Every structure is written in structure tokens, then in C-alpha cells.
Image (spheres, grey):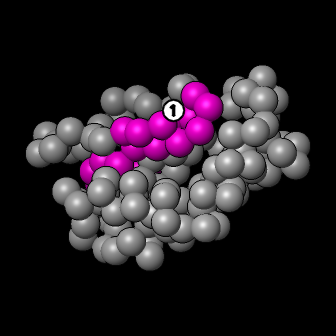
Amino acid sequence: MLDGGAFKALKRVMVESPRISRLIRELDATSAEEMDSKEGGLHVIKPTSDHLPSRPQQEPPHTTKLFGDVMVTCRKCADRGAEEHARGFVQAPPLSVVLCSNRLDNEAEIEELLLHELIHLYDLRVKKVRRC
């Protein structure tokens, strides 16, 4: 598990991965009004008390701007509820990507997962797919 090193690895992946940086640039170029997480399609996890970890987090979540007003957060995810088996997910409101640092082992997994979540955002925002 990367846990504490996940955020540093995420920042490296965001800068060094050509696939990730190209997709981020393309998403950033699309106007924010075109993406509404409340309207049909994108399955998002809304934060509730069910999503809180069963034990206190030892380290606070780390968040950085992904593009526009969309953030990406690395944090430990809960062992129960909607997050139970997730490695990452899209969450709203506010619209953000969450990567579960306690379930990622290396930078390659972070890149794969971030790319997966960005594709959901790309489909919704650019291709206008309303069901992901």
C-alpha cells in the first residue's frame, strides 16, 4: 500500500504521464457549464456518514486541483458502505475524483485508476454520454 506516498505518486503521474496530462488538458478546455454532476448519468458517491472510515484517519486527505473546479483527493477509504471495495471513484458535490490510498500499491495503479476515472469525466463532458 502506498498510503502516505500516494499523493506524491499522484502528483508525479499527473505531470509525467502523457495519457493523463493530455486528457486533463482536453477536459480543462471544455467549459465547466457543460458538466453537471447532478443531471443523469454519472454514478457518483455522495459523502455521508456511511462513507466515513470505521477508525480515525491517521493522515488527512491530500487534495489538488485536477482541472477547472474539479479536484482529486488521495485518502484512506472506508472498509464498509459504498467505499468498501473501491480503489477510487467520482464524488459529488463538489465534483471530484477520490483515489483510495490504502488500496493502491504503486504508481502504475494510480495512473491506471486516474485514467479510468478521467474517462468517465471525459465521456460525460466531451462526448455528452449521460449513462456511464
State left or right for residue 90 relative to residue 60.
right
Q: Nearer the viewer, residue 76 or 15?
A: 15
Q: Position of residue 52 (x, y in %)?
A: 29, 38
Q: Is residue 125 magenta?
A: no
Dot 1 falls on a residue whose secondary structure is loop
Residue occupied by mark 1: 46
| Figure quadrant of the N terminus | bottom left
Percent coordinates x, y for residue 106 in the rendering: 34, 74
Which amino acid, by three-letter code, is at mark 1?
Lys
Residue 84: tell me if it is visible: no
Total marks drawn?
1
* Residue at x 64% of width, y 67% of height: 19
- In the displayed structure, does residue 109 sit left or right of residue 19? left
Residue 87: which quarter of the image? bottom left
Quadrant in the rendering for residue 119: bottom right
Q: Residues within 10 Å of mark 1 (few under 14, many from 20)?
A: some
User: Where 119 falls versus 66 (above or below)?
Assistant: below
Q: Looking at this view, is 98 or 69 the one in front?
A: 69
Q: Residue at left 37%, top 39%?
A: 63
Magenta part of the protein: which range?
63-83
Q: Estimate the x, y position of residue 31 in percent, counting from the top left.
A: 78, 29
* Residue 79 x/y as whole percent: 29, 54
- 109 w.r.t. 87: above or below: below
Image point 15% across, 44% down: which residue?
59
